[in-house]
Amino acid sequence: MAKKSMIAKNKQRQEIVARYAEKRAELKKALIDPNGTDESREAARVGLQKLPRDASPVRVRSRDAIDGRPRGVLTKYGISRVRFREMAHRGELPGITKSSW
């Protein structure tokens, strides 16, 4: 189980990313615009730098949806490898069977 504060901080980051997503996309589009002037590109670069650090989607950590474990998360299922294995053994994941050979 991850610390509650780390889980809360990650949720806060997700909210900040969602809040600034449109503005960030607009600035990035202006940054790579081939018809833009050097001044407009520079203004877009400065605008991106002025956004909060947590507005970057890279800073959001993928965590287990149940207990918040930060490592070994299977993004397709949203749970960690440890919990995936436990749930698969108990038969709680439809279509997943333990392989044996």
Image: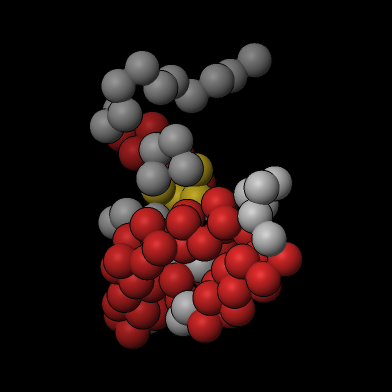
Point 33% across, 84% down: residue: 5
**Residue 15's x, y, as percent?**
30, 68
Which quadrant is the C terminus positioned in?
top right
> Residue 3 appears in which quarter of the rendering?
bottom left
Point 57% across, 56% down: residue: 30
Camera-side residue of 56 and 63:
56
**Residue 66's x, y, as percent?**
29, 56
Point 52% across, 83% down: residue: 50
Q: Is residue 89 left or right of residue 100?
A: left
Against 65, is 90 above or below? above
Q: Can residue 76 be seen in this view?
A: yes
**Residue 31's x, y, as percent?**
63, 59
Camera-side residue of 45 and 64:
45
Which quadrant is the N terminus positioned in?
bottom left
Camera-side residue of 70 and 19:
19
Against 55, is 26 above or below? above
**Residue 84's x, y, as percent?**
42, 41
Give the image's coloring scheme: secondary structure
Camera-side residue of 22 and 56:
22
Q: Is residue 38 left or right of residue 45?
A: right
> Residue 58 appears in which quarter of the rendering?
bottom right
Total residue callouts: 0
Point 36% across, 79% down: residue: 9
